Image (cartoon, rainbow, N blue to C red):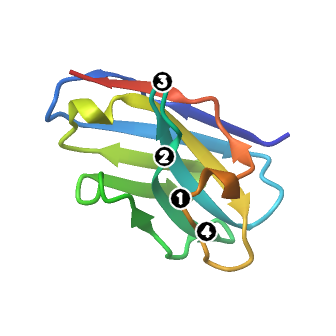
Amino acid sequence: DVQLVESGGGSVMAGGSRRLSCQTSGLPFENYCMAWFRQTPGREREGVATFYLRGGNLAGNTYYADSVKGRFIISRDNAKNTVYLQMNSLKPEDTAAYYCAAVKRLYPSCTLKTSDYNYWGQGTQVTVS
């Protein structure tokens, strides 16, 4: 079974940092896009960051939503099958449930559209005050 399990959420003061983790298992393909999304009540889920993995290794096509560019960093630890989202200079408007997602892709054509992803984690809440 495919599993994406997020962790690392919690409460943080504005200006602080937090690192989210997404441990993956069972993905039935080697080349895929991984992404982080976030959602607040009453709003649509929005893409935060994405990158392309070929054979499990980072292979470019990395980009970020304008709202987090320069503050958030997406990364990958192959040995741990884990994707990270390092969040710095956090703002109250970053408060949301954060989700990781994956989709098979033969080529580096990652997007931040929720409709493009078919594997999702359960989410982890981040509250910035």
* Residue ID for mark 1: 112
**Label placed on residue 53:** 4
* Residue ID for mark 2: 46
Viewer-proximal residue among 107 and 18: 107
Viewer-proximal residue among 94 and 1: 94
| Residue 45 position within the rendered picture, expressed as x and y whole percent measured from the top left | 53, 40
| Residue 68 position within the rendered picture, expressed as x and y whole percent measured from the top left | 30, 52
Amino acid of disc 1: Leu
* Lower position in the chain sequence, tag 1 or tag 2: 2
Please tell me which residue is depicted at 45% across the width and 29% down the height of the picture.
40
Amino acid of disc 3: Pro
* Lower position in the chain sequence, tag 3 or tag 2: 3
Judge depth for marks 4 and 3 and give the one in front. Answer: 3
Amino acid of disc 2: Glu
Instruction: Name the side, left or right, on which 46 lies relative to 53.
Output: left
Amino acid of disc 4: Leu
